[in-house]
Amino acid sequence: MSKYVYFFGGGKADGKAEDKNLLGGKGANLAEMVNIGIPVPPGFTLSTEVCTEFFKEGRKFPAGLEAQVNEALARVEGLLGKKFGDPSNPLLFSVRSGARASMPGMMDTVLNLGLNDEIAAGLAKKTGNDRFVWDAYRRFITMYSDIVLEVKKEHFEEELEAVRREVAQRKGIDIGKYNKEELKTVLPDSELGAEDFRKLVGVFKGIVQKHVGKPFPTDPRQQLWGAIGAVFGSWNNNRAKAYRKMYDIPESWGTACNVQSMVFGNLGDTSATGVAFTRDPSTGENVFYGEWLPNAQGEDVVAGIRTPFNVTKEAAAKSHPGTSLEEKMPKAFGVLRDIYLKLEKHYRDMMDIEFTIEDGTLYMLQCRVGKRTAAAAVRMAVEMADEGLITKQEAVMRVDPASLDQLLHPTLDPKAAKKFLAKGLPASPGAAVGVVVFSAHDAEKLAAAGKKAILVRIETSPEDIKGMEAAQGILTARGGMTSHAAVVARGMGKCCVAGCSALSIDYATQTMVVTVYDDSGKKVVEQASVKAGEWISIDGNTGKLYLGAIPTVDAQLSGNFGKLMTWADEVRVLKVRTNADTPHDAAKAREFGAEGIGLCRTEHMFFGPDRIAAVREMILSSTVEQRKKALDKLLPFQREDFIGIFKAMAGLPVTIRTLDPPLHEFLPTQAEHIKALAKELGVTIEDLERKNAELHEANPMLGHRGVRLAISWQEIAVMQFRAILEAAVEVEKQGVKAKPEVMIPFSLTKRELDIMKGVFDKVAEEVFAKAGRKIDVLYGTMIELPRAALMAHELAKTAQFFSFGTNDLTQTTCGLSRDDAGKFLPEYVAQGIFPKDPFQSLDTEGVGQLVEMACQKGRATRPDIKLGICGEHGGDPASIHFCQKVGLAYVSCSPFRVPIARLAAAQAAIAAKSQMKVASTH
Amino acid sequence: MSKYVYFFGGGKADGKAEDKNLLGGKGANLAEMVNIGIPVPPGFTLSTEVCTEFFKEGRKFPAGLEAQVNEALARVEGLLGKKFGDPSNPLLFSVRSGARASMPGMMDTVLNLGLNDEIAAGLAKKTGNDRFVWDAYRRFITMYSDIVLEVKKEHFEEELEAVRREVAQRKGIDIGKYNKEELKTVLPDSELGAEDFRKLVGVFKGIVQKHVGKPFPTDPRQQLWGAIGAVFGSWNNNRAKAYRKMYDIPESWGTACNVQSMVFGNLGDTSATGVAFTRDPSTGENVFYGEWLPNAQGEDVVAGIRTPFNVTKEAAAKSHPGTSLEEKMPKAFGVLRDIYLKLEKHYRDMMDIEFTIEDGTLYMLQCRVGKRTAAAAVRMAVEMADEGLITKQEAVMRVDPASLDQLLHPTLDPKAAKKFLAKGLPASPGAAVGVVVFSAHDAEKLAAAGKKAILVRIETSPEDIKGMEAAQGILTARGGMTSHAAVVARGMGKCCVAGCSALSIDYATQTMVVTVYDDSGKKVVEQASVKAGEWISIDGNTGKLYLGAIPTVDAQLSGNFGKLMTWADEVRVLKVRTNADTPHDAAKAREFGAEGIGLCRTEHMFFGPDRIAAVREMILSSTVEQRKKALDKLLPFQREDFIGIFKAMAGLPVTIRTLDPPLHEFLPTQAEHIKALAKELGVTIEDLERKNAELHEANPMLGHRGVRLAISWQEIAVMQFRAILEAAVEVEKQGVKAKPEVMIPFSLTKRELDIMKGVFDKVAEEVFAKAGRKIDVLYGTMIELPRAALMAHELAKTAQFFSFGTNDLTQTTCGLSRDDAGKFLPEYVAQGIFPKDPFQSLDTEGVGQLVEMACQKGRATRPDIKLGICGEHGGDPASIHFCQKVGLAYVSCSPFRVPIARLAAAQAAIAAKSQMKVASTH
């Protein structure tokens, strides 16, 4: 017969910490504490296998379970010298669920189980504490009825309130002045007496009889099995199902059920209860940090009705000297200190613990690895490694890479008052404060005058680049996490809130109307109108938008941060490059530790005010000669750009992508701009509009772009190739090594690569001949179309490297336009159709198949092919793990994500070696 | 040592018909004719391996070749009793290229090789025909100089013209009246005498000396090797390279070179030359069909200067009685008749033959399988099978399925005079004649008045459907082969010319300006302006547009056509369904042999004038209730549609796709329509424009469409499910079997299918409960996104069938928007980047991988999963072969392509069994 029940108590347990899958987190840790000699009230855990069986058999318990429960129960009775159901010496239990993963909010708990009228009377006699017993009894009926009998809590609360009002009236309190919640504070439960509770118990029983049609069960064993059934049943309640879906927890895991003998923190002034962390969870400082309440049960500490005291003397000294557990109950505190030190040493991590002191004796009720802020995680990891508690590699695994974003950017002061306006997507982290401007031009103007502006646009376009650079932050009404605004802002390390659909922007009146919703996000509370020039603040970490100027807190990169990064670099295998288009970004990325440029987008260089005219002249040319003339004007600019970038990267590889976007992106679309351009170029407005119409595309994402442009207008590619090569030659002449890698975007076939390779070789021959020196240049391609991945064995015949453009690859593989998907993608994620936004975290299941396939096929043709990723996913930790798995050489991401990528890459390397669980999946 | 030279002559040849790869088509067939006892002037073939060696060794001949040539030459001399280079009894040769595949236009030929002054004199003495000899000599110098010495033909033609003018003047002809070409007709070469040619020979030698710097070679062996080298060299001239690229002929094949002893049809009135087909190549009638000329060389028959006579008495009787070869040279004709009958029986196909009669003796110079019209191909195939010459399966293989299009639609009368205007894409076959209208509304108006209209639009949109139906044909200035106009027109079986970029359409002035180009397509010749109301004619088979009303010829589906189709159906494995959205199309498709509907697009049903209002009301609804109310109005319409379709298909499966396009496609975009709609719905224009802006998508192809709509607005799907099920119930109540298959478009994940399956099951339960009967319904999905193919193993858990939407799958896999790709795709095909337009013929190499993968993954999960294709490729023969290969159950195509698909499917089945070469790759 299977073992279903795992006993713990008396210094020995059937289970251990590693048995989480079988016993749940709570059960496993209780067993572990018992095993290492920590005082824990004895009890037993019904394993997750019982849960599985329970549902398999149509909510019936497996045969043999009852006997095992009885045996364990008898062992508890033996240890404690009390008897379950014996009025003369009663034993009470708590029954709690406890799943493998922490699932707060679905955990059903029944306390004080094993009471009936007779036993209550017996317990009162034994403890001499009537009030405690009837309080416990009424709490038990409420919890049990709610969870097991499905009688709503509100019914009991109404009666409790009635009693409270009676008592208040009796005490002369003007109850008319207070609402229900206020009354609880004015007259807490502690003010109610034994008689009040005894009366309530009677009333509560009536409520049960009325709603269930049967009396409240008086047999303790019947109560126990009812509670166990309810705990297992709760695994499949709607709340739990929704939670599992959200956090991707398999239904098959099941929950365990812990039955533990009760200890009471509310037996009087020698009793107490508390929660604590072995280190400060906000700062990470190595100080014991906890709160406690005398004469209270656990839920009182959390409920917030009574304000708990600090556990340590040092902490209490700052606010309420003399209230600490250390001072009030020094003996119990001494035990607690020994325990927490032992636990941290044993678990080798900061622990979150719950304790109860019953009549001077301390018991541990729970311990688990504690949650912490990003800053605390870094500090604890580094200090624990320095203390020798953990290894450096473990330290590296302890920090969630994504959380570093908080450390790298300024944040809105959490303590400042805020007037919330609306919520958009947290498109680029950080915080920004400035006055509203509705055009890139205005943003530039204000910046030039030394003023701070937030650029607010319906959506941004490449024409807005300079204004985005000038602004403190960017706010858009439309577009998703990978919209133009979001991508560019992340690239700049600039705060951006995108797709804030509550905004209705009117450029003509220079006003945005914000529709303000209530907390539920459903009801319109009011409409606020914000004009150009008014101050707003945006939070790129949360996507929230506030009225007024809120103070910000600067990023503080402590020494611990740098230390952790060094350790990360020691173990990681994946190189980390950056996506940078300017010498400035390149330099910034190197500061963050970038080891090369994985994506340099040449088109961004076309938008400078000194260049765009030549670009437009080139587009509007009707002959090759005209076009070449315009390109000749661009050549020196591009060459200078590359010289700057090569110098900034000083010998590190620089992957340069030839022109990618369709040409219409470079033409103005607004009437006034068209008019201005027509005048400038000496053409008619009609001509310009005809050109616009001619270049218009129904689906520009799938349009005439990338290598397709280069095939149609080879002279553009010729100019770019020449600029790259001449820049490299020039830089090397100056004694700096240049390592250009020329990358062809959007290719589908080997033939496209061959045609452009022919053009490239010809240009190279000319440039090298003229310069009298040669540069080593790699020639490769983006893999950003499914067909390119499918034909990778062919492409690799010509391409010396692949760079996965997973943004576009996701768009085409999934048929999702990142500019439009905002309309339904959040709903898709909410409904579990996608586990995550596939533009934020690589869809490894689908898109990942193509990436893996392309890696295999590419290597089959060219074993030493260089493989990397330059999509947005290059900075996403989960995606980086995938990149490590398929064996890429590097990931490339925006400068501000470089540290995140370095840490994630280190974790992926360690995980690959040791299958260790990583922090990001805590 | 390798065998390089293959001798033929004297009743025995080294090669045979099967040796095409080695000897080229011409050489292999010469050998075959010799082997079966047909009189052929002896000679020898230098194999394609020589060509390969020639280029491998830098244009040098392989060792040992010369000895083999000398030996073969000696054998020819021995057989004919003449000597190469012997003035007293000279032997002349022709030297011709001959590749594996017919490559007209690249075939370099040198005739009369082996002449010099001395030999010419000897030959004149021997034949007693001075004029013949000097004529042959000057022809030889011209050809040899052109091909071997690279002296341009024009130099020689100028001199010939000068002589012609001299002679004309001498004869008193007023040469001022005629231009060069006219003079050739007035004074043909036959009017020139021996002296004229002798003089020309002298002048020609001077031209060679001048351009080459060396005299014309007089050594016959030097001449021979020069010609052989030129023939092999021509394999890599630009003309040949371009041709090979166009027809996908590998460079590695190489050409063979045939050296054959000359016979002369121009030795006098007992000599003649001719070409013939063993059956009529235009009609397919089983009559010998040929043309001949007395006293002429082969090129004279083709050159068109002299009008040739009919070969048979019967044919000559109709125009020029008494001129036939049958009457003029009955003995030679008798030999020819025996030969052609023997050849057809031997080759079991209609043959194209060339013969020469030298002094009464007939020789065969060439034979090959003859080209034929589509009508002829059908008739010959069926009649040859009926005659027992070939099997039924061979008959099925003999007809190119794509050519059937010509038979199924009317065509412009080929004999009518035409005023060509411009050329667009042949988007939908057939011909149409009507007056120009520029709006769908006008087309409807004219149709209502019984008048014929051609709807001319920049591009069409779904709003134009009714007008397209009303028009005779459709002409658009923009859009490719799979643009809206093209797809809808093919679906309707209506003639369409799309993407005619020469058109500049101005709706305001109701005028289109046509820019007319010269033959090269480069120079603007004139600009024509066509106003609304003027007659035009369009040819959907060629894409050409003509001014005026050209008479049309109706499709004539002969009994042979039906017979061939029956034979095709006997062998084919793939089922053929149709894409049809109306009872009318469904009925038409059944006439063409459709075995079900593979794709019924429900959105087309939404555009009827009686429905579109409700659709728009639905879209503009702001609450679910409003939306449901609008949908309630649509329900009866949809139900009626489905009732009609189920009845038309009477028990055959009907696959119905739920709403697919993004909702903005249903809203008007033109200001006047917006105004009208706002008025109709009682909303403001601003509201409507805001809704338009809200629904606007940057890339609608990748937008909020397909199942994504159904997830967002389940009530739309509910309405459609209800309409399908209620219609099926109703039809079955009337005693007709209904076989609906519900198809979810654009799905990416199993979860999407599960959500919609839940909705479907609920509706079905309700409908069946109310009706008191159940209908068997299959539930499946389109596979039209790469991710769907990659995740097919998951989708197949819920989907009972897959239908490959290869249009969209091609768009996403290749990142090509079919609406936009017209700008570069033709260039891509021309440059060999794609072998064919991937929207016309499935990209089996790339997209095909996904189709094959999805089939395998789908079957792994659900072995009996039903697999089909409903993209445009379902009607493309090459794609159908692929479908057979991967084991699909059916293909689905527009009604007019059903016969094509049936034939192609039959050929695919036969090819799969026997690896036979199919007609479409002739």
Image: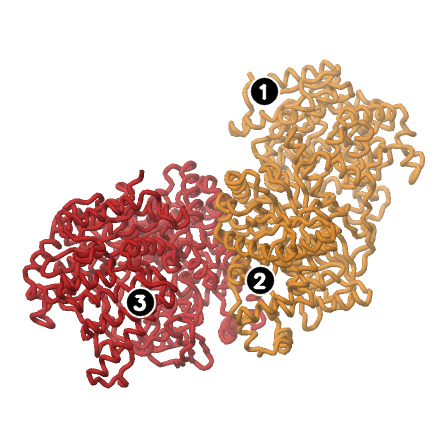
Chain colours: A orange, B red
Badge 2 amino acid: Ile
Which disc number belongs to residue B205? 3
Residues flagged by tags 2 and 3 on a common chain? no
The residues bearing labels 1 and 3 have C-alpha atoms spaced at a distance of 114 Å
Which disc number belongs to residue A65? 1
The spot of residue B461 in percent (x, y) is 44, 67
Which numbered mark, 2 or 3, is in the foreground of this view? 3
Indicate the secondary structure of the residue bearing disc 2: helix
Indicate the secondary structure of the residue bearing disc 1: helix
Tell me the residue at 74%/68% (across/down): A442
For disc 1, the neighbor class at 10 Å (few under 14, some 14 to 19, many from 20) is some
Indicate the secondary structure of the residue bearing disc 3: helix
Badge 3 amino acid: Lys
The residues bearing labels 1 and 2 have C-alpha atoms spaced at a distance of 77 Å
Residue A118 visible in the picture: no
Tell me the residue at 44%/45% (across/down): B850
| Left or right of A528 on screen, residue B97 | left
Chain where mark 3 sits: B
Q: Assign the N terminus of chain B to one quadrant of the image.
A: top left
For disc 2, the neighbor class at 10 Å (few under 14, some 14 to 19, many from 20) is many
